[in-house]
């Protein structure tokens, strides 16, 4: 039987009593033994805290966990970010599984999302690998040794009004897919803050009916996306976002907290949407694209002069971003605005040379391949994880890109326009997955590295280069390929290399270079999207 909590104060105080303690001190020995028997179980920590510390049975309730008080319980991990110098959410916050056949019938204010998650007892712990547990030949971070660091009551109504407006816009996007009979096509990349993530493995039991289509769809749960949760948890860790002080129940059982004022979040970063009323009539995406439209087909030099931007003659990569920034009257980078950071929108400049028009559409290329974010590690993703658990899958399945498109003419560049784009799930699960599997097999079998002598030059002072048999831009069509991503091309242990899962198979390596060109290390690599694939994503500006 569930433990009974009569007031929200009791829930809050129970949560606060867990702060500063290791998970193993909050749960039973039986629960710890259960984790040791199956350390792959990602839901273990939340289930154990729910059952052992809060005294609630584990089940998928349609109502809130503390149903008499309307409070949902959630645990989420924090991971240290060197870039932000702070502990931030490690992943999305998964909320309630919803029914395709019922959810679309409601409006946002009566949605299951708001009913289930309006007030959340949010427990934060440090995903800090202080110890490891070896299981079936692999090392797993010891979840029982994680430290509980924060406990707050998160009221969705305490979020910025702008945030709630965008979340409502996201909810409506998801509902439109359901009404179109396309529930299986829902992707986290199509929304900003609120996602709809698949729940459970791809087995028959996790597929369900959907209205307006005879095709069954993978069941889904609403979630606050990873990038949005990073911003929320950053504010919590820094003490800027405290427990909710506006929830109506406090009037009775928490009067001293309810009397406080200034409960709403305040924004510190620049915003691209200054007038909230715009979101009542126009989608977030359309507001952004409308800002670009007056500048379509304008010469880049004219734009640069208009906005006071200098175009460098060589290695000019910054001016396009600066021009986009000035189109929005921003002081800082577009990608660093409040909405873009919370949504994790990546801004990418895509350029196509005018001579590409002479080729057939399928043979056209952009000037550069499309590099993915730097912390998507190809070695770690290859050796330890399945495809849908990898960083590169998570990045491509959840990230929305704003593509700023230029055409390079003999006399200079012209701004062609902008569009939002995300990678469709069917592409991720077919061509891209096959390429990843090929990379994995090649590395696990032992990557083939071939030494070749070349003439010394400013670009190559070593006088040799190393080729490999991993998928490249030229060996396509793959969509995805890898190439070196390090300041120095090292094949020994260094900050510029990764350890290989299996010894490399060297070809033509000089005997006196085995200490420099070792069997166990390879220059650090990065994932890139191919030039031909990226042209297809912007071809409407050229055809």
Image (cartoon, rainbow, N blue to C red):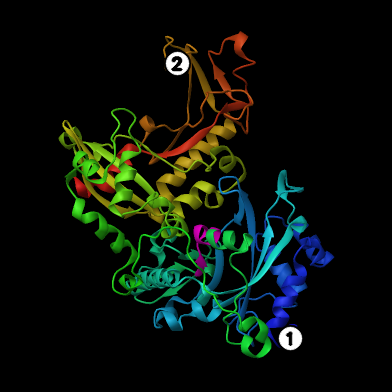
Local packing at callout 2 (Cα closer than 10 Å; few below 14, some 14-19, many 20+) is: few
Q: Using the rendered image of the protein, determine whether residue 423 is visible from the camera's viewpoint.
A: no
489 relative position to 35: left or right: left
- Residue furthest toward the right? 29
Reading the image, the residue beneath label 2 is: 460
Reading the image, the residue beneath label 1 is: 4
**Height in image: 401 above or below 271?**
above
Local packing at callout 1 (Cα closer than 10 Å; few below 14, some 14-19, many 20+) is: some
Label whose residue precedes the other's in the sequence (1 or 2): 1
**Height in image: 391 above or below 454?**
below
Which residue does the image show at 22% across and 41% down from the upper left?
A: 305
Which residue does the image show at 78% across and 60% down from the upper left?
A: 22
Instruction: Tell me where the magenta segment starts and ends, as one range.
Output: 220-230
Which residue does the image show at 63% across and 60% down from the upper left?
A: 237
110 relative position to 82: left or right: left
414 part of magenta stretch: no
229 part of magenta stretch: yes
Q: Are marks 1 and 2 in contact (CB under 8 Å)?
A: no
Secondary structure state at the residue bearing disc 1: loop
**Height in image: 397 above or below 377?**
below
The span from disc 1 to disc 2 (Cα, nearest Å) is 71 Å
């Amino acid at each position: 039987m569930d433990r009974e909590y009569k007031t929200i104060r009791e829930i809050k105080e129970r949560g606060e009593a867990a702060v500063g303690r290791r998970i193993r001190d909050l749960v039973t020995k039986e629960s710890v033994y259960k984790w040791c028997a199956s350390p792959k179980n990602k839901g273990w920590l939340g289930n154990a805290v729910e059952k052992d510390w809060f005294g609630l049975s584990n089940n998928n309730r349609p109502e809130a966990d503390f149903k008499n008080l309307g409070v949902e319980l959630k645990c989420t991990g924090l991971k240290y970010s060197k870039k932000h110098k702070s502990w931030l959410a490690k992943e999305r916050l998964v909320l309630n599984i919803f029914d395709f056949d019922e959810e679309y019938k409601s409006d946002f204010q009566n949605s299951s999302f708001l009913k289930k998650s309006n007030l959340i007892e949010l427990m934060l712990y440090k995903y800090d690998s202080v110890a490891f547990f070896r299981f079936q030949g692999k090392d797993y971070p010891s979840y029982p040794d994680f430290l509980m660091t924060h406990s707050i009551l998160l009221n969705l109504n305490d979020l910025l009004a702008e945030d709630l407006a965008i979340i409502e816009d996201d909810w409506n996007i998801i509902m439109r897919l359901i009404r179109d009979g396309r529930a299986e096509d829902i992707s986290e990349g199509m929304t900003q803050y609120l996602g709809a993530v698949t729940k459970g493995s791809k087995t028959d039991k996790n597929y369900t009916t959907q209205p307006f289509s005879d095709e069954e769809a993978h069941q889904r749960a609403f979630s606050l996306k990873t990038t949005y949760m990073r911003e929320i948890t950053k504010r919590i860790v820094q003490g800027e976002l405290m427990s909710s002080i506006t929830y109506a129940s406090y009037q009775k059982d928490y009067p001293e907290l309810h009397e406080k004022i200034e409960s709403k979040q305040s924004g510190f970063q620049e915003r691209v949407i200054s007038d909230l009323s715009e979101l009542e009539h126009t989608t977030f995406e359309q507001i952004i694209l409308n800002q670009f439209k007056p500048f379509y087909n304008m010469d880049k030099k004219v734009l640069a002069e208009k906005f006071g931007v200098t175009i460098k003659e060589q290695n000019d990569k910054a001016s396009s971003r600066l021009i986009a920034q000035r189109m929005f009257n921003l002081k800082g980078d577009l990608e660093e605005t409040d909405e873009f950071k919370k949504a994790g929108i990546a801004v990418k400049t895509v350029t196509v040379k005018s001579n590409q028009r002479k080729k057939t559409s399928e043979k056209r290329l952009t000037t550069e391949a499309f590099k993915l974010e730097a912390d998507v590690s190809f070695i770690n993703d290859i050796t330890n994880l399945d495809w849908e658990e990898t960083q590169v899958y998570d990045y491509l399945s959840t990230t929305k890109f704003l593509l700023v498109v230029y055409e390079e003419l003999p006399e200079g560049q012209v701004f062609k326009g902008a569009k939002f784009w995300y990678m469709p799930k069917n592409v991720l699960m077919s061509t891209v997955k096959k390429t990843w599997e090929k990379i994995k097999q090649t590395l696990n079998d032992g990557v083939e590295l071939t030494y070749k002598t070349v003439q010394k030059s400013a670009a190559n002072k070593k006088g040799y280069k190393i080729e490999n048999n991993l998928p490249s831009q030229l060996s396509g069509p793959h969509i995805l390929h890898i190439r070196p991503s390090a300041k120095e091309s090292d094949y020994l242990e260094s900050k510029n290399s990764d350890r290989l899962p299996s010894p490399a198979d060297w070809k033509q390596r000089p005997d006196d270079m085995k200490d420099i060109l070792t069997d166990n290390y390879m220059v650090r690599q990065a994932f890139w999207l191919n030039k031909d694939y990226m042209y297809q994503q912007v071809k409407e500006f050229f055809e």
